[in-house]
Structures are given as C-alpha cells and as structure tokens.
Image (cartoon, rainbow, N blue to C red):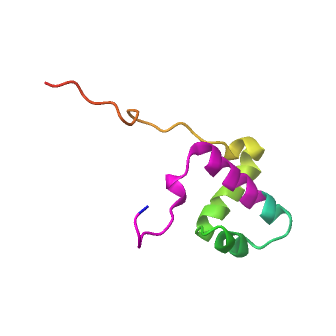
Amino acid sequence: MTAGRELDARSLDHATLAALRRRAVMAVLAGRRVEDVAAALCLNRRTVFRWMSRYRQAGMAGLAARPIPGRPAGRARPPG
C-alpha cells in the first residue's frame, strides 16, 4: 500500500475477510456494541450491521466468501 492511503478490507483475501466477518459477529453476539466493533476493526458500522443481518438469515455459512462475478483477474483478451 502506498503512504497516505487508508486500509481497505476489500483488499484482503477471501479467507481473511471471512475470518474478519466471523470475528465481528462473534464480538457483537458476546455483547459488544456494533459501533465499538466497527471502530476496533476499522470498518463502517453499516458493514457490521449487514454482516449481522447475513448471520441472522443464514448463520455462519452466510458469512462465507461469495464468488466474484465476471472474468477472472489476470486473463488477457485475445487480440482482435
């Protein structure tokens, strides 16, 4: 990362981001406020609320990484 740029959870790999989701949800379930969890993990509170909603709908499986739509990164188009 370059100096001056903030950390962004979107740059994390799928396994790390899934672990971050589980950690955030478990902290809220343990009684911590969503705002405190979001601040501790440098996330927006809406993100934690969205993860809590996914957890309530589908359990821990709802926090798993989803496939990224579209063409896989690094594949060049054929010349033409």
Which residue is at a point 66% across and 70% down the rendered structure image?
Answer: 38
The residue lying toward the viewer, choosing from 58 and 24, is: 24
Q: Hey, which residue is sitting farthest right in the picture?
A: 30
Q: Is residue 16 above or below residue 69?
A: below
| Residue 35 at x, y percent in the picture | 69, 75
| Chain part drawn in magenta | 2-25
Relative to 29, 67 lies left or right: left
Q: Residue 67 in magenta?
A: no
Q: Is residue 52 above or below residue 66?
A: below
Relative to 35, 12 lies left or right: left
Q: Is residue 62 above or below residue 21?
A: above
In this figure, what is the number of numbered marks? 0
Residue 41, located in which quarter of the rendered image? Answer: bottom right
Which residue is at a point 56% across and 46% down the rendered structure image?
Answer: 13
| Quadrant holding the N terminus | bottom left
| Residue 28 at x, y percent in the picture | 79, 65
Which residue is at a point 58% across and 40% down the rendered structure image?
Answer: 66
Which residue is at a point 49% across and 39% down the rendered structure image?
Answer: 68
| Quadrant holding the C terminus | top left
The residue lying toward the viewer, choosing from 4 and 51, is: 4
| Residue 74 at x, y percent in the picture | 36, 35
Relative to 11, 4 lies left or right: left
Q: Hey, which residue is sitting farthest left in the picture?
A: 80
Q: Give the main secondary structure of the magenta stretch.
A: helix
